[in-house]
Image (cartoon, rainbow, N blue to C red):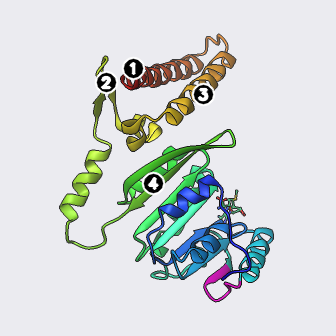
């Protein structure tokens, strides 16, 4: 029995649920090492690396792991992104609570450390499309997306896998191709979604069209509208084009929401 048991936020709990049982995990940007400590305490895994680039959160992680008596199972390491792991050391990587652009930079710079990694569980706070694009361009298949609301904030969790053997390569590549293939949605009118739009909205999230996802995009539309209003009435060609493209994007998102909301009623 442990001195105390970690209780996770709903967001971290949903990330934990996606970790394959018994896999070796690296949690990058682990801060207080809540996620790896929880996973070990629950008996879901028996080895983890908690990586941190900053000394403060690294110290917090180290204290947590020591207090939980898990220093032999959770290795706390200081370093930038995937620099804290060796190739082949873990099968699962979690990166949560950062921007999507930073998450994709960490993956890009640490590509050579991904040998043997089968599952990526990524929770960008913003810029989810950066992560989807990186996964798509680097041979990963986005296998699921979850959206949730906690304390007034909306979070997306993206899970991805990849095929390292020649077996099933064709089927795997065909699934990757289908994920972002042009799609037409809507029983009440039709909207055509291209790859770029699916990358923004999330291919699995579009298919599910949950109320939280609809709320997210309704409030994104309000933000975009504010940006458009602040652009004013400039006569400059470049400003006009920017405004036009924003309007086009907003119209498309609005069309998707209208279509899918009607279906839900
Ligand atoms: N992952 C935890 C969560 O989701 O609750 C903590 C998120 S916290 C907001 C982000 C953490 O990522 C910070 O502790 C920060 O120091 C760390 N971080 C930022 N950039 C990093 C990088 N390049 N490599 C490792 N850690 C990083």
Q: Within 8 Å: ligand 1 and the Cβ of disc 3?
A: no
State how far apart marks 3 and 1 are (Cα). 18 Å
Q: Dividing the picture into quarters, in which one does residue 82 lie?
A: bottom right
State how far apart marks 1 and 2 are (Cα). 9 Å
**Badge 4: residue crowd in 10 Å (few <14, some 14–19, many ≥20):** some
State how far apart marks 4 and 1 are (Cα). 33 Å
* Residue labelled with disc 4: 134
* Residue labelled with disc 2: 186
Q: Dividing the picture into quarters, in which one does residue 39 lie?
A: bottom right
Left of 108 or right of it: where is 6? right
**Residue 219: assigned label:** 3
Up-down relation of residue 172 to residue 214 (above or below): below
Q: Which of 64 and 128 is in front in this view?
A: 64
**Residue 262: assigned label:** 1
Q: What element carries label 4?
A: helix
State how far apart marks 4 and 3 are (Cα). 25 Å
Are the two marked residues, 1 and 2, in contact with CB atoms closer than 8 angstroms?
yes
Q: Main secondary structure of the magenta part?
A: loop
* For marks 2 and 3 on the same chain, the one whose residue lies earlier in the sequence: 2
């Amino acid at each position: 029995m442990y001195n105390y048991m970690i209780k996770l936020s709903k967001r971290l709990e949903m990330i934990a649920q996606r970790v394959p049982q018994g896999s070796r995990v690296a949690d990058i940007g682990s801060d207080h090492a809540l996620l790896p400590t929880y996973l070990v305490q629950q008996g879901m895994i028996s080895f983890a690396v908690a990586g941190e680039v900053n000394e403060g959160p690294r110290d917090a992680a180290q204290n947590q792991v020591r207090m939980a008596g898990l220093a032999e199972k959770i290795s706390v390491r200081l370093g930038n992104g995937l620099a804290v792991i060796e190739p082949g050391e873990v099968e699962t990587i979690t990166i949560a609570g950062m921007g999507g652009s930073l998450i994709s930079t960490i993956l890009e710079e640490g590509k050579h450390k991904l040998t043997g990694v089968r599952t990526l569980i990524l929770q960008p706070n913003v810029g989810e499309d950066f992560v989807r694009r990186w996964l798509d361009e680097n041979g990963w298949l986005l296998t699921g997306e979850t959206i949730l609301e906690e304390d007034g904030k909306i979070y997306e969790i993206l899970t991805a896998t990849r095929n390292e053997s020649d077996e099933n390569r064709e089927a795997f590549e065909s699934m990757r191709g289908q994920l972002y293939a042009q799609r037409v949605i809507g029983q009440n009118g039709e909207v055509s979604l291209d790859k770029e739009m699916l990358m923004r909205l999330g291919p699995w999230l579009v298919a599910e069209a949950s109320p939280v996802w609809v709320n997210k995009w309704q409030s994104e539309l309000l933000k975009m509208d504010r940006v458009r209003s602040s652009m004013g009435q400039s006569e400059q060609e470049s400003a006009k084009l920017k405004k036009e493209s924003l309007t086009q994007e907003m119209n498309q998102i609005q069309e998707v929401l209208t279509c899918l909301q009607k279906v839900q009623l």
